[in-house]
Amino acid sequence: MPRAIWTGSISFGLLNVPVRLYSAVSSRSIRFRELREKDGSRVRHKRVAEEDGEEVAYDEIVKGYEIAPDQYVVMTRDELEALDPKRSKTIEIEDFVDLDQIDPIYFNQPYYIGPAQGAERAYALLAQAMAEQRKVAIARFVMRNKESLAAIRTSADGEVLTLATMRFADEVVPTSDLEDVLGESEDVEPRKREIEMAKALIDSLATDFDPSSYRDEYREELMSLIERKAEGKSIVSADSEAPKPTKAPDLMAALEESLAAIKGEELSGGAKKPSSTAKRKPSPSRSSDSKSSTAKAKSKSKAKAAK
């Protein structure tokens, strides 16, 4: 059974729904330990005071905000926990908006919201109403001494409420800051024919989103490398070359060749959609997956577009 990482309630008008928050993702990142190279001894990090170099116990540490070099305003745990205790236990819904109005750059960490004991009916009521209205609730709540903006919506099946913490507007770098690196508009403005060809190429590769069809191939290859080294097998490093961007005069040719390759495979009886798992060669330790002829066409068209 998953363990709740936060308990409180959703405040919606006069409705108050006790809920629990659960992690919605489980990291699969490969983590390494730090070792001393000469003997493989584990390296550990300790909290050490700069003044005398002595190790400091966790319960002796307080938080300080630096207002000037080496000058701090010290805050105790009690002082931080005393900040508006009501808000620290409530997810306050402020607005309902359409999902497509939210730029994905504002989304941060996802969670599942589950009902607390005895709140199942009120929880189901809110979930069903939000699913039928197809709206996203924008709310605020405090977790780990930090106020977060959050987007609440139902899962794809409409039965579970999900919450994604969001970045505040002043935390997002405005796109105007990139004007110097995007180039002058007259130099980068695509031609109408190029746009039409690009749209046709997008349409030819369009499909329904299936998250299970995408794998972390880099992590799989890294684990394969670790396993081979653990078995004492020799590792041969391969030179890799970064793909080069398609030059402006070659854009049209690259688009035409990419589209022709995909259409040609469709006419010859190949599958319309290339497999997302066939974009890269499998690791030597894994059996080679069979690739569709369409996947090969897509790989070739990408290679031509990169020249």
Image: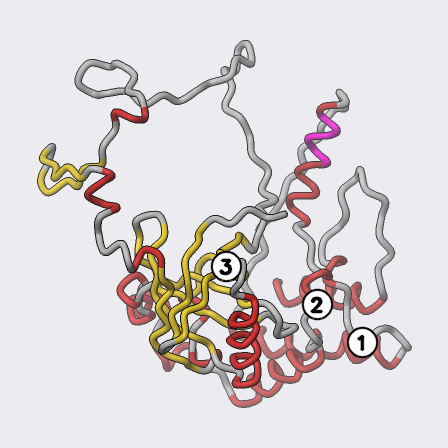
Q: Is residue 173 magenta?
A: no
Q: Quadrant of the C terminus?
A: bottom right
Label 3 vs label 2, nearer the camera? 3
User: To which residue does mark 2 refer?
Assistant: 210
Residue 111's place in the image compared with 124, above or below, is: above
Q: Is residue 60 left or right of residue 161?
A: left
The residues bearing labels 1 and 3 have C-alpha atoms spaced at a distance of 33 Å
In the image, what residue occupies the spot 71% across and 28% down? 235
- Report the disc number at residue 110: 3
- Above or below 193: residue 16: above
Name the residue at 46% across, 82% down: 98
Spatial CA distance of label 1 from label 2 is 16 Å
Which comes before the other along the chain, label 1 or label 3? 3
Number of labels in the image equals 3
Q: Is residue 178 left or right of residue 63?
A: right
Residue at 74 percent across and 58 percent down: it is: 277
Q: Which residue is mark 1?
A: 272
Q: Which residues are magenta?
A: 224-229
Q: Secondary structure at mark 1?
A: loop
Secondary structure predominantly adopted by residues drawn in magenta:
helix
Cβ atoms at labels 1 and 3 below 8 Å apart:
no
User: Callout 3, which amino acid?
Assistant: Pro
Amino acid type for the residue under numbered disc 1:
Lys
Residue 75 rendering spot, x and y as whole percentages: 18, 39
What's the amino acid at mark 2?
Asp
Whichever of labels 1 and 2 marks the residue nearer the N terminus, that label is 2
44 sits left or right of 75 in the view: right
